[in-house]
């Protein structure tokens, strides 16, 4: 028996100026189901969710809840109707405790004059227990991103929801935390709560959801039970074409010269990583796996001299890499693509071309350090074309672009200095499927051109698909490396999470 | 990259039929040109309205007086705008300007130092004050607001201490020194020439040089600037120092103009200067602003003051009106920005 439809959306449209974000969308959500929504960035997923949560008002169309037409005029109204949305981006107050964050709405509505911290912490602990070992009294700023994401989810769980919308909740979670979340989602669904689950990851959708709806270019393409459709059908529906290979071919056996490009020996910093040694060979893409907080980013930032004092030796193409600051590293062609694109990867308010030129302004300047606007635009245009950047004008601020195109700007910025060695930290986080495979192909081509590529990723399938070899970081040092047929999620997870005593000899 | 240029062209990849990368004038120039146009229109409208309201408004004497009023403050506005773009702020500009006068005046009067040498010493001291503030901000890690608030009070205290609270009359200043404040080449006062040269030079540098582009990067997103290899601490240190140095120069010009050193000069001036920069498009969050806009902001405020005086509006009302103009300007700007995005 099919459960009754809880939320029925018909012919919903929404435009932002000339951009038609939703073009007459139909969508239905059944009671107690986990309904995945898939689509590239810009497909209209977020617009639809924001309409359901009352953040945006539709231009036309109808929303019915329990069969009755409703107007969801604000998030507060949505909340009263039992609709909760967990945003992809974390919106917590960093300077107050986890418990206070979780019950912010309740505190706001409370009539009592004094805060009852004891009750607050107790209630928060109850919610948190099912998710993680987070202490309710901890300040949010002291938590790593993955734990903050769990706090966001805990916050939504405390609202008495009938419809819970989760927008890419696992982007920052470890595998184990994600599994916990899926368990909770299933439990909630069994209690009759309907969940809308937005994700780019096919595995998550097919393992944990009941139905999947695909959106493309502001239209609803198809809805199916996950049993009646394959992941590649979903991907094809998302991009509107066949994606024959999701990943570019790996380095051919015959091209392996074994020539060591980068040799790192005994690299340590004050406390976050120690005794790190590895080689990067010419033409290969080296992956770096590990749990969040294991020290992956810190190691590559150390090599780039972005933060902290490091000891140990680094050799690039046979010469010692003895830079002291990141600007010296850039001068030697060693660059780092940040994992936090909006936080420190791009200048959101500045024009695209001014972003691309930032690493080496001298390249777009003429005599006396005067910037030549034509040179600057030309550089951005050339790199933009190479990376298939979709933008209106190069003078538009980066904030006007979609996530995938913002990431291409960040990448263009790296490529502007003709780097010898690029460290990429989560290069496809928050990037849609199409742009993601483009970025993978770009990286492979760069590697084929002799540029050293090191990719950090929390997405193990990405590392397996993209890299020739993966080294695994655990507790600030390298716990092992896998290549060829040994590159499996199981092997990497094992190296990433098993502690010293249980370790098997490789 | 030198190879593979066509590798990702739209057609070959078959992804996007219209991957267009349009050519255009940099956005900030287009947008800020709009704001500057708006300011010019408002100023012109005021001119036209006032020329009907008061027969004295469009006289040479009045225009000259108005220009003199904003010209020296204009130097402070330049320094403040650049500092705001880098993400900082300086509340000490009024009292540091006064201190510049007092130091030079005191050295000339009580120590018999040549006025030119005394001026150089005074400007160098202001540079030192800026460097000290820069040190506290970039090395110690304090906020610009707090550091400059402290310096504002300290500098004012030093002014009063050095003069006993009374203006130093500098009747013996040589005429060639007074010339920079009072003289003119043809009909145009030296002060205004200095002002225009400074405006054109700094406006050009801010728009075109790599040096000042780094100021935009730093103010737009300090962390992203660090991750682009930019020494943001150095940038902030230098913009802080530059702002105080310009205060020193402005102080000397004022001294030459007044023929005296006034320890209570410029109380509240910092607010006018910040207001002008903000009206002209500088953001308190850093990363945006132009010299031309800021100068139009200071001209607007000066024209308004002069108009109110000519219309016999009470001085007390003038502050209320100027404050309201600031509020209106930033509100309109904010709403326009919101509409655009």
Image: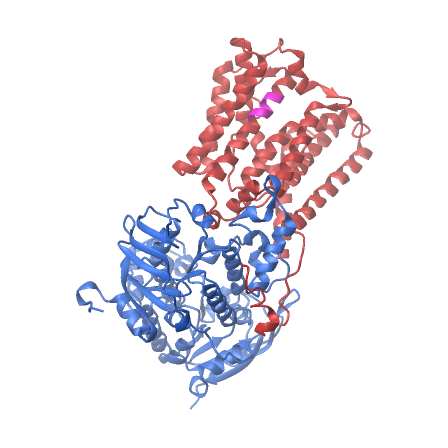
Chain colours: A blue, B red
Is residue A328 found left or right of B120 in the rendered image? left
Q: Quadrant of residue A10?
A: bottom right
Q: How many marks?
A: 0
Taking the spot 67% from the left edge, 31% from the top edge, the residue there is B197
- Taking depth in this image into account, of A496 and A252 the one nearest to the observer is A252
Q: Horizontal and vertical percent for residue A18?
A: 66, 66
Taking the spot 29% from the left edge, 58% from the top edge, the residue there is A121
Residue B251 lies in magenta, yes or no? yes
Taking the image as drawn, is residue B94 in sight? yes
**Main secondary-structure element of the magenta-colored stretch:** helix
Taking the image as drawn, is residue B267 in sight? no
Residue A57 lies in magenta, yes or no? no
- Taking depth in this image into account, of A94 and A343 the one nearest to the observer is A343
Q: Horizontal and vertical percent for residue A100?
A: 36, 56
Q: Horizontal and vertical percent for residue A178?
A: 35, 70
Q: Quadrant of residue A262?
A: bottom left
Q: What span is colored magenta in the figure? A: B248-253
Q: Horizontal and vertical percent for residue A372?
A: 63, 47
């Amino acid at each position: 028996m099919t459960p009754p439809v809880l939320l029925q959306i018909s012919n919903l449209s929404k435009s932002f100026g000339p951009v038609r974000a939703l073009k007459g969308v139909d969508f239905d959500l059944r009671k107690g189901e986990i309904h995945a929504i898939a689509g590239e960035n810009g497909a209209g997923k977020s617009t639809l969710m924001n309409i359901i949560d009352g953040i945006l008002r539709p231009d036309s169309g109808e929303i019915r809840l329990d069969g009755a037409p409703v107007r969801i005029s604000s998030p507060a109204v949505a909340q009263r109707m039992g609709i909760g949305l967990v945003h992809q981006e974390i919106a917590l107050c960093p300077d107050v405790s986890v418990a206070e964050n979780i019950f912010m709405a309740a505190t706001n509505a409370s009539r009592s004059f004094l805060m009852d911290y004891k009750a607050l912490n107790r209630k928060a602990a109850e919610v948190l227990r099912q998710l993680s070992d987070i202490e309710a009294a901890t300040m949010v700023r002291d938590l790593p991103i993955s734990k903050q994401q769990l706090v966001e989810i805990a916050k939504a769980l405390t609202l008495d929801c009938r419809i819970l919308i989760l927008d890419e909740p696992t982007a920052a979670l470890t595998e184990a935390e994600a599994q916990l979340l899926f368990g909770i989602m299933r439990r909630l669904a069994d209690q009759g709560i309907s969940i809308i689950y937005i994700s780019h990851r096919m595995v998550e959708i097919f393992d944990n959801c009941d139905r999947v709806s695909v959106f493309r270019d502001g239209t609803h393409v198809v809805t199916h039970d996950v049993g009646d459709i394959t992941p590649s059908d979903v991907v094809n529906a998302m991009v509107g074409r066949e994606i024959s290979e999701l990943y570019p071919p790996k380095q051919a056996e015959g091209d392996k010269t074994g020539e060591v490009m980068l040799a790192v020996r005994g690299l340590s910093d004050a406390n976050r990583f120690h005794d790190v040694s590895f080689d990067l060979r010419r033409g290969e893409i080296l992956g770096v796996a590990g749990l969040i907080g294991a020290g992956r980013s810190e190691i590559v930032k150390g090599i780039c001299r972005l933060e902290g004092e490091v000891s140990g030796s680094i050799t690039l193409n046979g010469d010692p890499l003895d830079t002291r600051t990141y600007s010296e590293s850039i001068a030697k062609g060693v660059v780092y693509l940040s994992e936090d694109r909006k936080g420190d990867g791009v200048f959101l308010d500045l024009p695209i071309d001014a972003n691309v030129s930032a690493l080496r302004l001298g390249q777009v300047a003429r005599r006396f350090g005067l910037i030549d606007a034509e040179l600057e635009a030309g550089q951005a245009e050339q790199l933009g074309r190479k990376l298939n950047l979709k933008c209106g004008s190069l003078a538009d601020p980066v904030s006007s672009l979609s996530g995938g195109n913002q990431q291409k700007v960040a990448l263009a910025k790296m490529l502007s200095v003709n780097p010898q060695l690029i460290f990429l930290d989560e290069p496809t986080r928050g990037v849609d499927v199409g742009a993601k495979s483009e970025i993978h192909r770009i990286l492979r081509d760069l590697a084929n051109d002799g540029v050293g590529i090191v990719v950090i990723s929390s997405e193990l399938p990405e590392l397996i698909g993209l890299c020739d070899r993966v080294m695994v970081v655990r507790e600030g040092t390298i716990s092992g490396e896998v290549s060829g047929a040994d590159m499996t999620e199981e092997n990497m997870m094992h190296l990433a999470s098993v502690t010293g005593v249980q370790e098997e000899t490789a | 990259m030198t190879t593979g240029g066509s590798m990702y062209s739209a057609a070959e990849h078959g992804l996007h039929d219209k991957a267009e990368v349009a050519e255009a004038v940099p956005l900030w120039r287009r947008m800020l040109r709009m704001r500057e146009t708006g300011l010019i229109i408002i100023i012109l409208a005021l001119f036209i309205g006032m020329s009907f309201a008061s027969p004295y408004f469009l006289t040479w004497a009045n225009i000259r007086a108005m220009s003199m009023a904003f010209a020296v403050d204009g130097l402070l506005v330049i320094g403040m705008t650049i500092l705001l773009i880098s993400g900082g702020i300086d509340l000490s500009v009024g009292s540091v300007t006064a201190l510049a006068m007092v130091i030079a005046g005191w050295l000339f009067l009580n120590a018999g130092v040549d006025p030119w040498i005394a001026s150089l010493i005074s400007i160098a001291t202001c540079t030192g004050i800026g460097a000290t503030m820069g040190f506290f901000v970039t090395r110690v890690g304090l906020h610009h607001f707090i550091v400059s608030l402290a310096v504002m009070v300290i500098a004012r205290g030093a002014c009063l201490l050095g003069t006993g609270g009374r203006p130093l009359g500098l009747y013996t200043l040589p005429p060639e020194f007074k010339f920079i404040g009072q003289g003119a080449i043809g009909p145009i006062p030296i002060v205004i020439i200095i002002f225009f040269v400074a405006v054109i030079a700094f406006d050009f540098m801010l728009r075109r040089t790599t040096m000042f582009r780094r100021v935009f990067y730093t103010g737009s997103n300090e962390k992203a600037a660090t991750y682009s290899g930019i020494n943001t601490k150095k940038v902030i240190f230098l913009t802080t120092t530059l702002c105080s140095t310009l205060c020193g120069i402005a102080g000397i010009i004022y001294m030459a103009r007044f023929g005296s050193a006034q320890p209570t000069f410029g109380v509240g001036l910092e607010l006018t200067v910040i207001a002008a920069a903000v009206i002209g498009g500088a953001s308190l969050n850093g990363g945006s602003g132009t010299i031309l806009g800021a100068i139009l902001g200071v001209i607007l405020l000066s024209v308004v003051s002069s108009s109110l005086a000519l219309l016999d509006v009470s001085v007390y009302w003038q502050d209320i009106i100027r404050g309201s103009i600031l509020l209106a300007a930033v509100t309109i700007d904010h709403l326009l920005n919101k509409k655009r995005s």
